[in-house]
Image (tube, grey):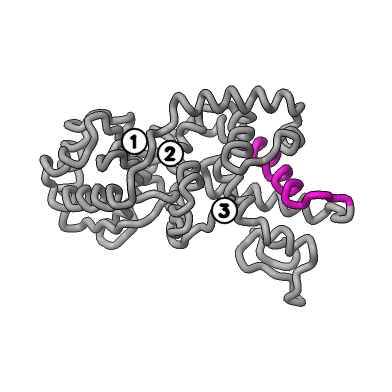
Amino acid sequence: MIGTSHAGPGGRGARPHDDRPDAATQTFLAHRNLLFTVAYEMLGSAADAEDVLQETWLRWAGVDLATVRDQRAYLVRITTRQALTRLRTLGRRKESYVGPWLPEPLLTSPDVAEDVELAESVSMAMLLVLETLKPVERAVFVLRDVFDFGYDEIAEAVDKSPAAVRQIAHRAREHVAARRPRAGASADDVRGALDAFQRAVETGDVQSLVDVLAPDVVLLGDGGGVKQAVPRPIVGVDKVARLLAGGLGRLSEQLSLQPVQVNGHPALVVRLDGELDSVVAMRIDDGLVTGLYAVRNPEKLARMGHEHVLSR
């Protein structure tokens, strides 16, 4: 892992032995959060995003900075190309994935939620929409609609002409618009729905769950074949409420729930006997829970110990 003077600054807090980063290192560190966010939005995996940053650094370290006009754009171009390569590999890996695949949840700081556009773009619901795009469409949409890069800059990153990029962006935008989540709720509505949901789960009160779930609520679970999870989406308030009240109610004495911010949105960390068991991210609209995304795959929970800094 990058984190020493020999490997570079991909890890947090890395510095050369003389404690004074060179120009390439300073630039990389200045844009690291942006590069991670780009890679994560393209891949839905923090582990793979970190690997992309490793590869980006190795290529950036060999660049003659005097030949680079826009260092930020150049770094994003490297990151995008590496992420596209990995995205195709991930597609093959997902074909053999056991059960539903969900993005890797990220514990995020309050400032991510305050940037409404950024929070929406990294929400579990939006990342699942982005999964339905082709790799180049996803890259173009992320760079244009989330990070506002110009068509010429994107064209260099994805090896297409600017005219082709405009067409791809239009097609991807229409695709996302037809599937994207509804407009988000107010902070008060979100807080109220999260509190009501937590109380209902902790008490196992089916009626209270019914009251806080939208009629068309969808529950998705990701155990990765390692932990038990729902094998297919559960749709509808009655089915979801009964499943939650029955399954979690039996574990009430060992169960603890902690409200957190995951991917810029409300979520619950679930612990059994004090051990991290799962993360349940939520989509809340008009004061009701419309989406529940339960991640139990231990590999996807390995980074829940610290907050991630995302930026545009």
The span picked out in magenta is: 67-86
246, above or below 254, in the image: above
Task: State yes or no: residue 61 in magenta.
Answer: no
Answer whether residue 89 is visible to the viewer in this image: no
Rendered image quadrant of residue 291? top left
Rendered image quadrant of residue 208? top left
For marks 1 and 3 on the same chain, the one whose residue lies earlier in the sequence: 1
Residue 148 % position (x, y): 63, 41
Q: Could you classify mark 2 by the number of other residues whose Cα lies within 10 Å: few (under 14), some (14-19), or many (20 or more)?
A: many
For marks 2 and 3 on the same chain, the one whose residue lies earlier in the sequence: 2
224, above or below 26, in the image: above
Q: Secondary structure at mark 2?
A: loop
Does 231 sit left or right of 196 as displayed?
A: right
Does 234 sit left or right of 149 as displayed?
A: left
The answer for how far apart the CA atoms under marks 2 and 3 are is 22 Å
Q: Amino acid at mark 2?
A: Leu
| Residue 311 tag number | 3
- Image point (26%, 50%), residue name: 194
- Report the number of numbered marks: 3
For marks 1 and 2 on the same chain, the one whose residue lies earlier in the sequence: 2
Is the residue under label 2 in contact with that under label 1 (CB below 8 Å)? Answer: yes
- Image point (76%, 36%), residue name: 156
Check disc 2 and report the residue beneath it: 102
Q: Nearer the viewer, residue 88 or 163?
A: 163
Q: Amino acid at mark 1?
A: Leu
| Residue 42 tag number | none
Residue 54 % position (x, y): 67, 53
Q: Nearer the viewer, residue 202 or 182?
A: 182
Check disc 1 and report the residue beneath it: 220
